[in-house]
């Protein structure tokens, strides 16, 4: 592996929810995901980091450029005292690419 980081891939489909509570937020049609909607993705990954270390979750440029989705609190910091599953908070920043909902293992090897 020549990359400085590792890719996280989830098979979980996002349950997108609006960040705000007016207008489209009251819609029951969740198929029309719009800018500003968010979701939490489970990774199935658990770490116990050595004391004094941290791990960071960073968005890949391809995630934002190709799919119009980014990590809300990038970089996300996982402290050494955290215990539990690593989850990633995503937010829609443009017209959502429907291919984001398809499982495509080749996408995880795209360059950033």
Image (cartoon, helix red, strand yellow):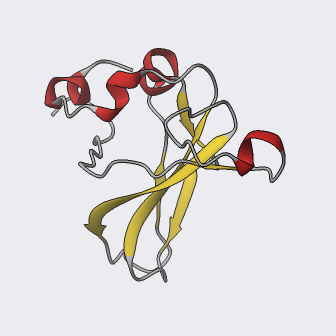
87 lies left or right of 27: left
Q: In screen coordinates, is 17 left or right of 15?
A: right
Q: Nearer the viewer, residue 51 or 45?
A: 45
Query: Considering only vertical position in the picture, is 44 above or below 62?
Result: below
Quadrant of the frame with the N terminus: top left
Task: Count up the numbered dots.
Answer: 0
Q: Is residue 2 above or below residue 27?
A: above
The location of residue 60, given as percent across then percent down, is 44, 30
Quarter occupied by the C terminus: top left
Specify whether 20 is left or right of 71. Answer: right
18 vs 24, nearest the viewer: 24
Percent from the top left, x then y, of residue 105? Answer: 15, 31
| x and y percentages locating residue 69 in the rendered image | 53, 31
Q: Which picture quadrant has residue 98? A: top left
The residue lying toward the viewer, choosing from 112 and 35, is 35
Residue at x 26%, y 44% (from the top left corner): 9
Q: Give the quarter of the image for residue 94.
A: top right
Single out the residue that lies furthest toward the front: 28
As drawn, 37 above or below 76? above
Q: Residue furthest right?
A: 22
Who's the residue at 67% across and 45% down the image? 27
Above or below residue 54? Residue 91 is: above
Q: Pinpoint residue 61: horizontal percent, then vertical percent.
A: 47, 22
Residue at image location 64% in from the left, 28% down from the top: 93
């Amino acid at each position: 592996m020549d990359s400085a980081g590792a890719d996280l891939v989830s098979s979980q489909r996002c349950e997108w929810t609006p960040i705000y509570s007016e207008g489209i937020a009251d819609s029951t049609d969740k198929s029309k995901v719009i800018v500003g909607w968010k979701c939490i993705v489970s990774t199935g990954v658990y770490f116990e980091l050595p004391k004094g270390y941290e791990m960071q979750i960073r968005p890949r440029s391809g995630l934002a450029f190709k799919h119009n989705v980014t990590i809300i609190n990038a970089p996300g910091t996982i402290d050494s005292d955290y215990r539990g599953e690593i989850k990633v908070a995503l937010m829609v920043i443009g017209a959502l690419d429907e291919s984001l909902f398809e499982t495509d293992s080749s996408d995880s090897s795209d360059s950033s």
